[in-house]
Structures are given as structure tokens and as C-alpha cells.
Image (cartoon, rainbow, N blue to C red):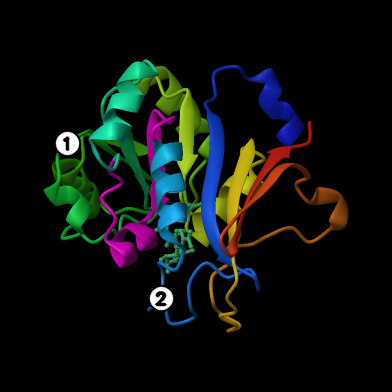
Amino acid sequence: MNSKLKNKNSKLPFVFVNMAMTADGKIATANRAVHSFGSARDLEHLYELRATADAVMCGARTVEISQSILGPGGEKFRKRRLQGGLAEYSLRVIVSGSGSLDPSAEIFEKRFSPILILTTQRASARKLAQLRKLADGVKICGKTEINFRVALRWLRTKWNVKRLLCEGGGELNGALFRAGLVDEIHLTICPKIFGGRTAPTIADGRGFERLKDAEEFQIQSIRRFGGELFTVFFRQK
Ligand SMILES: NC(=O)c1ccc[n+]([C@@H]2O[C@H](COP(=O)([O-])OP(=O)(O)OC[C@H]3O[C@@H](n4cnc5c(N)ncnc54)[C@H](OP(=O)(O)O)[C@@H]3O)[C@@H](O)[C@H]2O)c1
């Protein structure tokens, strides 16, 4: 799907991706054992960005592996949200096309804000019933793969999501890039090399095969804190 089409549809949220990446472009080690490697400043940055979002979204594997609850951080960030006219806590969105999401993931134990699950018709009736018990909303958006345009429109119209922060992982990001739905990327480049052919990157999945199809971004800012580079890219219209 062509990114240039997005502007024509005003009923989609602004989508921004935030990731920490090694100097060789990895977001975790190949065995997924190391998934958190940014500095304290990078963690602060993550909460700063969450404080500007109506909803935070992750793929099923990220929620399971990192055991992230997608929370707002401390009180100062909750205050910042309220001052900015947002709800005290953001909505939390999990993507699981097959419904394989682990029901014992920690996020389901913390009920401070609604949890929404995006899935497909691949999820069996049993899995769907399980997801519906776990989540505050379950949306089937596509036959075998999530149709993110449908999903985002639902988030905007049903849940009033105007700013959606995507925090990976690589497969989810890759699908959003392919759909031309990412408006902005916040990338923290960390001075480490993980290597590993199968280590995830900021955009995995099928990818693009031709240069002319690649999503184009422009650099907006680069700031250095300690040994890390905090970069922001925006999509070229
Ligand atoms: N450094 C960082 O900033 C950072 C940030 C986030 C994650 N990570 C790391 O990245 C790794 C996880 O990344 P990942 O790429 O393996 O997994 P992921 O994107 O978190 O999750 C993949 C799963 O999400 C669902 N999914 C994603 N895109 C879909 C689509 N288009 N249609 C249907 N379902 C879709 C599928 O779930 P089902 O299998 O249930 O269908 C898929 O198996 C972890 O090691 C994590 O720690 C790092």
C-alpha cells in the first residue's frame, strides 16, 4: 500500500515508532536473550514519548519476551499526560495475528488501562474466546495478516486514538512500514554490535524488494547523550 495515500485518509492516527538499535542495526540478540540495552536516558526518552501517545502498541513476541506492561512510567509522566490533555494512562494495543499470545504475560495482570488486541481470522474460536477474556477489546482485521489501515481506523474511530506509539518488534514495525503507515521514527543508536544473521532489526518480515518501493524518510534531528545518538526521522511525503 502506498504511503502517499495516508494523507488522504484523515481518520488514521499519527504513527510514531520508537526503537533502540545497535550500531549494526539489531534490536535484540539472535537468541532474544538481550532485549534491553539502552541507557537510563534512553528509558527516560521512552517514557517521554509514551507521555505524548493516546495508545502504545507492541507485537505479541515483544510483550512476551520483554514482559513489558506498556505503562506510563512514574507520576511525573502521568501528570505530563494530564497537562497535555491526555488520559492519565495510555491505551495498550497488542498485535497477534494467530492469537498465539501467551495469556500469562505480565501485561494482563496490570489493569490500569484498557488492553486491545488486534488479530486475524487465523485465530481459532478457542483462541478468540481466550483473547476476549483477557482484553477490553479484540478486533479481527484481516484474513491471514492484519490490515493495519482497518486496524488504525478502528483505533481512531472507536477508541479516539490520535497518536499511536509503536514499540516494535521488528515484525510488527516491518508490517507498518510496508503498509506505508509510519509517520515518524525515533531511533536510539547504541554503540554496541550484536551481529547474528537472525537477530531482529527495526523492520523485519517480508520487506521491500525494489528500491522504488522503499519507504523514504528524512532526518529531522540528531542529538548525542553520552555514547548514544538520539535520532528522529519523518516520512517524506
Ligand atoms: N530494542 C528495542 O527497542 C526493541 C523494541 C521492541 C522489541 N524488541 C525485541 O524484538 C524482539 C521481538 O521482535 P519480533 O519481530 O520477533 O516480534 P514482534 O514484532 O514483537 O511480534 C511478532 C508477532 O506479532 C504478531 N504480528 C506482527 N506483525 C503482524 C502482522 N502484520 N499480522 C499479524 N500478526 C502480526 C504475530 O503474532 P502471532 O504469532 O501471535 O500471530 C507475530 O508473531 C524481542 O527480542 C524484543 O525484545 C526490541
**Residue 141 seen in the figure:** no
Q: In which quarter of the image is residue 179?
A: top right
Q: In the depicted view, which residue is nearer to us: 48 or 195?
A: 48
Residue 237 shown left or right of residue 66 in the figure: right
Closest to the observer: 94 or 167? Answer: 167
All told, the count of numbered labels is: 2
Left or right of 81, for residue 192: right
Q: Which mark is residue 112?
A: 1
Question: Which residue: 38% across, 43% down?
Answer: 47
Image quadrant in which you'd find residue 81: top left
Using a 10 Å C-alpha cutoff, classify the residue at mark 2 as few (fewer than 14 neighbours), some (14 to 19) or many (20 or more). few
| SS category of the residue bearing label 1 | loop
* Residue drawn at x 28%, y 58% as measured from the top left: 101
Label 1 to label 2, Cα distance in Å?
27 Å
Per the image, the residue denoted by label 2 is 34
Q: What element carries label 2?
A: loop
Above or below, 108 relative to 72: below
**Residue 2: image x %, image y %?**
74, 37
- Find the magenta span and give its range: 51-71
Name above or below for residue 58 compared with residue 139. below
* Viewport quadrant of the C terminus: top right
12 or 127, nearer to the observer: 12
Q: Does the residue labelled 1 lie within 8 Å of ligand 1?
A: no
Compare marks 1 and 2 and give the one earlier in the sequence.
2
Q: Is residue 57 magenta?
A: yes
Nearer to us in this view, 34 or 134 = 34
**In the image, ligand 1 is in what quadrant?**
bottom left
Task: Tell me the quarter of the image containing the N terminus.
Answer: top right
Q: Do the numbered discs 1 and 2 sit on residues whose CB atoms are within 8 Å?
A: no
At a point 63% along the width and 39% down the height, the residue shown is 184
| Residue at the spot 42% in from the left edge and 24% down from the top edge | 161
